[in-house]
Image: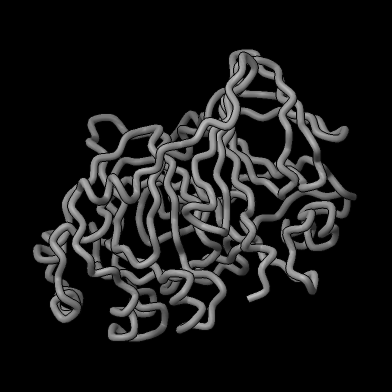
Amino acid sequence: MKKALIKLPRNRVRRNYLGGAGIDRLHGEPVCVDNDRPEEWLGSMVEAVNPGMDVIEHEGLIQVDTDEGKRYLRDVVDGEKEYYLGDCMRKDGSWQLSFLYKILDSSMRLHIQAHPTSDFARSVMGKRYGKLECYYILRVREDIEPYIYLGFQHSPSREEWKDIIETQDKERMEACFEKIPVKPGEVWYIPGGMPHAIGEGITLLEIMEPSDLVVRCEFEREGIIVPKEGRFMGRDIDFCLDIFDYNEYSKEDIVRKCKVSPVVLKDNPEYKELLLINETFTPCFYVGKIEVMKDSVISHHGRFTIGLVTRGACVMEADGCRMAFRQGDSFAIAASVQNYKVDVEDGAELCMVYPGNDMKMDI
């Protein structure tokens, strides 16, 4: 049975770093705990890759309640493609959702890493997607000065970087970077190929190309070891060295290049709609934010959408489906919906992600 609005269950996923208390806090849990599940994958149609960990079959893929019982969301969508996806399909009717949407919470600085660009993934690895990322900073833990590493501020040569990785010279590795300050409400763009790491104590939304391709340069952090099979995507270091952007960027360069200024699309007494990420940054997805002050009817953009309530609570209604959501709840909206109603008492903020034109391209 087709549903215009689907409530999504929580979907915590294991990673090789610690965190997650901030996700519990977002959900309003009475006890907030850091563990090895520091990410929640919203509406995910991507399987997690966790080398060195015990295998959990189809980890990362989300299941939803249907009249036939629990089913994977990707199968639900595939069964009614035109209803859920609209025209976001290739000519032969095949499709792959062009983004992965996460809540991420770090209690430690993450291992320094990089991801292949789309061009590298396609031309060299035979993969459709690399892993461009975008961050929307939600919250910061108390007594933390939040930061990220992003790009080389003191760039090594290719051979120097190889030596740093092979010898695991932490002092030289960290000396390649300066801390880039971040704060709640900011939006950041992380291009493929650019080395980076999220600092400790940050809760953020992470939207990316739908892959789990990662090169980890730092093999141990706070006692957490990245196993050999999890370092170089199953390749060797020489192959992975070609992924990195060795350009030198000052902190000011990074702010100009990677800090994003949202665009206001609508601003009225009922709600304010902003576009956080658009086609200037990626053809894969859009990221929007809707701040609802009063009961509103909001026009839908005709694309399959995954949303998260980042603040407040609301009741949503679309084509006869009516559901209540509170902070931390996520949902999917079918492409066929023309508009949806959002009722609020004290306001709500919704962060919405939907496909770009990439899903229509035959590559």
Position of 217 with respect to 51 (left or right) is left
Horizontally, residue 270 falls left or right of residue 85, namely left
Q: Position of residue 166 (x, y in %)?
A: 18, 79
Locate residue 111 relative to residue 191 in the image: left or right. Answer: left
Q: Is residue 326 above or below residue 225?
A: above
Residue under the image location 58 percent in, 63 percent down: 59
Q: How many marks?
A: 0
Q: Residue at x 40, y 32 (%)?
A: 185
Quarter location, residue 338: top right
Residue 314 locus on image (x, y percent): 67, 24
Query: What quarter of the picture does the C terminus occupy?
Result: bottom right
Say if 348 sits above or below 352 in the image: above
Residue drawn 41% across and 55% down?
36
Query: 211 or 92: nearer the eye?
Result: 92
**Figure colour scheme:** one colour
Residue 51 visible, this angle: yes
Quadrant of the rendered structure where residue 71 is?
A: bottom right
Residue 152 in the figure: left or right of residue 18:
left
Looking at the image, residue 107 lies above or below residue 119: above
Residue at x 19%, y 62% (from the top left corner): 248
Q: Position of residue 348 (x, y in %)?
A: 59, 23
